[in-house]
Image (cartoon, rainbow, N blue to C red):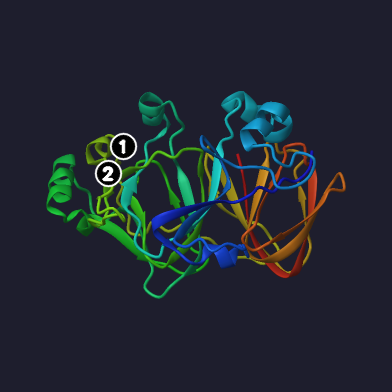
């Protein structure tokens, strides 16, 4: 197998902006593009291979065809034909809704789906841009219902000013929201289940408010999720991978590079995804397959990949993630 690129799936949204199209150097007149789904096996939003002999196949087709070769033996035993991760770019011109995601147990019971643990990497942030993550103080389910009813729920949420390079891990059960001016890369479990709690009383083009899921959300929320700082702190390093998230759902490292790095995957039983958030590079795997990657692009290395050489074109910043 060889490194796979996919056609981006662009999602126009009520709150979407104008950063994704130029970031990805796409030639389209679409506006209000809030998300670009880079690697997806979500039903009705399946990524399509853009390069090589498998061009035109969907990601679910690839998993069924190549099985352990693509995802790894342990992952195939764990997930079967379901690809476990969803990769996105998100551009919030307006605030996204305040929401929460169910964990695996609740999602399986209600939706026959994975839960949704996720992380954000801030690519850029307009002045004043913020993220909402968790509670500023502990509240009870009763207070939750009262505050949602009277419109004061946001008053007990933790908000953080953000800058490029910030990382936030958002486990299932954590109330959260992406604020206006935030441009992020999101890595998450394969799930499109979101319980919308508050949507700023917005109306769509037809004058309709979006559906809220305040009752369903109650069973998903971790009401004890209180911290002083929900940011993931890490020591940035150049030309060395820096691990920022390590969970049962995915492990993610940041590569900030000005010179060649060689990656040894001989002991890793997983696919590897690289998301380019800045600059450009050239990659060559142990079988001689070569591919170029630039800001706004994502590549999936199959589990058969044993080694990879990454050569930056002056400078490159990558997110590496695997299960």
Q: CA distance from mark 1 to mark 2?
A: 17 Å
Q: Is residue 188 left or right of residue 75?
A: left
- Looking at the image, which is closer to me, 225 or 177? 177
Residue under circle 1? 220
Which of marks 2 and 1 precedes in the sequence? 2
Residue 37 makes an appearance in the image: yes
**Disc 2 residue crowd, few under 14, some 14–19, many 20+, Cα 10 Å:** few
Residue 283 position in % (x across, y down): 78, 55
Mark 2: which secondary structure?
Answer: loop
Q: Is residue 213 left or right of residue 148?
A: right
Q: Is residue 235 left or right of residue 156?
A: right
In this picture, is 154 found above or below 18? above
**Disc 1 residue crowd, few under 14, some 14–19, many 20+, Cα 10 Å:** some
Q: Is residue 79 left or right of residue 32?
A: right
Residue in the image at 60% along x and 51% along y: 8
Q: Which residue is situated farthest in the bottom direction here? A: 127
Residue 51 position in % (x across, y down): 75, 47
Residue under circle 2? 211
Q: Which residue is situated farthest in the front direction here? A: 206
- Looking at the image, which is closer to me, 323 or 195? 195
Residue in the image at 65% along x and 57% along y: 297
In the figure, residue 108 lies in which quadrant?
top left
Mark 1: which secondary structure?
Answer: loop
In the figure, residue 111 lies in which quadrant?
top left
Is the N terminus in the top left, top right, bottom left or bottom right quadrant?
Answer: top right
Residue 32 position in % (x across, y down): 44, 61
In the figure, residue 313 lies in which quadrant?
bottom right
Per the rendering, the mark at residue 121 is none
Residue 265 position in % (x across, y down): 75, 43
């Amino acid at each position: 197998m060889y490194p796979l690129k996919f056609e981006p799936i662009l999602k126009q949204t009520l709150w979407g902006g104008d950063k994704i199209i130029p970031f990805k150097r796409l030639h389209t007149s679409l506006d209000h593009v809030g998300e670009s789904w880079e690697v997806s096996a979500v039903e009705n939003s399946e990524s399509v291979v853009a390069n090589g002999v498998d061009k035109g196949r969907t990601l679910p087709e690839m998993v069924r065809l190549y099985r352990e070769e693509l995802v790894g033996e342990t992952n195939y035993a764990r997930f079967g034909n379901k690809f476990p991760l969803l990769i996105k770019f998100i551009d919030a011109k307006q605030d996204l809704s305040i929401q929460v995601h169910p964990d695996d147990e609740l999602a399986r019971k209600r939706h026959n789906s994975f839960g949704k643990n996720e992380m954000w990497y801030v690519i850029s942030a307009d002045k004043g841009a913020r993220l909402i993550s968790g509670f500023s103080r502990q509240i009870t389910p009763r207070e939750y219902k009262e505050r949602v009813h009277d419109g004061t729920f946001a008053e007990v949420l933790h908000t953080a000013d953000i800058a490029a390079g910030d990382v936030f891990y958002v486990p299932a059960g954590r109330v959260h929201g992406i604020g206006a001016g935030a441009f992020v890369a999101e890595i998450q479990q394969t799930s499109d289940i979101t319980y919308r709690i508050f949507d700023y009383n917005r109306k769509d083009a037809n004058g309709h408010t979006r559906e809220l899921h305040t009752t369903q959300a109650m069973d998903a929320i971790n009401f004890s999720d209180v911290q002083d700082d929900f940011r993931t702190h890490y020591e940035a390093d150049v030309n060395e991978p820096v691990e920022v998230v390590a969970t049962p759902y995915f492990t993610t490292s940041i590569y900030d590079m000005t010179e060649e790095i060689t990656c040894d995957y001989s002991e890793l039983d997983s696919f590897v995804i690289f998301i380019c958030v800045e600059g450009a590079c050239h990659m060559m795997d142990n079988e001689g397959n070569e591919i170029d990657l630039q800001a706004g692009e994502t590549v999936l290395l199959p589990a058969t990949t044993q080694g990879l050489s990454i050569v930056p074109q002056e400078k490159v910043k990558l997110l590496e993630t695997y299960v």
